[in-house]
Amino acid sequence: MKNESEELLMIFAKNPVKGRVKTRLAKEIGDKAALDIYEFLLNHTFKVTKNLQVDKVVFYAEGLPQESVFDSKIFHTEEQQGQDLGEKMENAFKDAFAKNYQRVIIIGTDLPEITQQDLEDAFLHLKERDAVIGPAKDGGYYLLGMKSLNSKVFKNKAWSTASVLKNTLEDFKNKDVKLLKSLNDIDVLSDIEGDSELRKFIR
């Protein structure tokens, strides 16, 4: 992958396989509806990122899929490397900085509210700040951007719990961090109760 930009957007995704995605949500609405919602979210992520004027790479959790909503002319694809989410994210950032990217942002694919403008703003803030973080309403974060590697943010975290954002901010103590607006990410049924677009997938 040859750098076209000083900026890189990394998207962490799962392969859209029934029974393997949105497992907490699937316990409430079934595997088929959970897969439909995940595929909707993947499409939304593609739409809001495809026109960003930065390099883009999608990191898949379990092997590279045969087909992908992410156009291979626009998005590079890689496989996540590591044991837990923290190690996988750290390895992705390490690789990005080794390739001389100056500003690197990571997001997931569970964000029906995120827009292209949100991501453009995040990269603009990162030009001026040490880091940017998008707080999720469940106490985690939906976006993390850095200009150099801070490995502490990936260690000793209870991932998918309400303590993640608080503990991550402690790891950035004495750094200039921009907090973005809080957004909802989709993990359980209560996360979609106010979203008519997602509710239509529940039979």
Image (tube, rainbow, N blue to C red):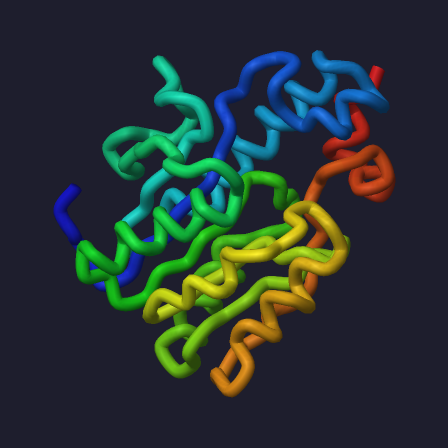
Residue 92 or residue 191, whichever sits in front: 92
Residue 46 or residue 100, whichever sits in front: 100
x%, y% of residue 1? Answer: 16, 41
Determine whether, in the image, residue 201 is placed left or right of residue 181.
right
Position of the C terminus by quadrant:
top right
Quadrant location of residue 143? bottom right
x%, y% of residue 123? Answer: 40, 67
Asked if 23 appears above or below 9 in the picture, the reply is above
At 52% from the left and 40% from the top, the residue drawn is: 84
Determine whether, in the image, residue 139 is placed left or right of residue 69.
right
Determine whether, in the image, residue 187 is placed left or right of residue 11.
right
At 51% from the left and 87% from the top, the residue drawn is: 174
x%, y% of residue 3? Answer: 16, 52
* Image label count: 0
* Residue sticking out furthest to the front: 156
At 69% from the left and 63% from the top, the residue drawn is: 182
* Residue sticking out furthest to the bottom: 174
At 52% from the left and 78% from the top, the residue drawn is: 177
Quadrant location of residue 93? bottom left
Asked if 70 appears above or below 130 in the picture, the reply is above
* Residue sticking out furthest to the left: 2
Residue 117 visible in the snapshot: no
x%, y% of residue 30? Answer: 79, 15
Residue 124 visible in the snapshot: yes
